[in-house]
Amino acid sequence: MNVRAWQFEFLTLVFAALTCSPPPGLAQQIESTVSAQSAETNKTAPSQKLPDGYYVEFRVAQIGAYGHSYVVYGPSGGRAQYADLHPMGGYAIMALGHVLPVPANSEWDPDVLKLPVAARYRRKLSAQQYHELLGAIRLVKAKHRYWNAVTNNCNHFIGEVARSIGMRTPGAFQVSYSFVPELRALNESPRGRNPERAAYRPSRAHVAASAPTSSSSPRRPANIGSTPMPRTTLASRIFKPSQSSPR
């Protein structure tokens, strides 16, 4: 009985091993199927969309008699970022900043977005220009440590940002309500779009070379017709009698 039981168990193990072992090439078939499914998934999965471009927008928030200038920038259709310069503290510090320099704050205040936008000017940027803009904003924030209504205000801040990407800027000593519209006018005019052509002035040598050469023959006087007789008035006849014309 023990021998027969052992033989039965041995045959059972052999049968289980034969039925459970995968046929030849099954592992390769499974691996190829998984690879094909992964490739199909990669094709159907949405790829990360790159931004179509970048922009910078100069705005004026409607507040008080001056307004407040700030910058909006970011990828087109993406998350916007903001930058500005304002005095640190309340209205008392701002009033003092009209006479003396006061500490400045370049940290963005989200409450500015609650104010109506009085004017705006948007420019499209290339990737290179946007990279230069980001670097300029970091430098300008680190540079402007004080605020003064005359020498270092929010117009000075956004003016430096605009110049970092090659824009022309108006004088900063004016209210923000007029600064941003003038910024638009300077850069949207033909002179602003092509500053090299607008800055061109012919030299004296060029003017002399293009001037007509003088000839040896005397110039004839221009034919201006008959000389008109002077008109007399009643007052001239009274205070200065007219002379008789020669015969």
Image: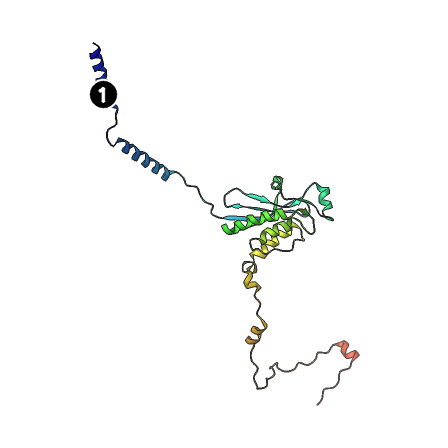
The quadrant in which the C terminus is found is bottom right
Q: Residue at x 77, y 79 (%)?
A: 237
Q: Is residue 6 above or below residue 223?
A: above
Q: Position of residue 220 (x, y in %)?
A: 59, 84
Q: Is residue 24 above or below residue 100?
A: above
Q: Residue at x 22, y 20 (%)?
A: 14
Specify whether residue 5 is in view.
yes
Q: Residue at x 58, y 44 (%)?
A: 82
Q: Residue furthest front?
A: 3
Q: Residue furthest top?
A: 1
Disc 1: which residue: 14
Amino acid identity at mark 1: Val
Q: Residue at x 32, y 36 (%)?
A: 35
Task: Tell which of 1 and 241 is nearer to you.
Answer: 1
Task: Tell which of 44 and 242 is nearer to you.
Answer: 44
Q: Position of residue 130 (x, y in %)?
A: 52, 49
Crowd rating for badge 1 (residues with CA inside 10 Å; few <14, some 14–19, many 20+): few
Q: Position of residue 3 (x, y in %)?
A: 20, 12
- The reply, left or right, for residue 24 in relation to residue 131 is left
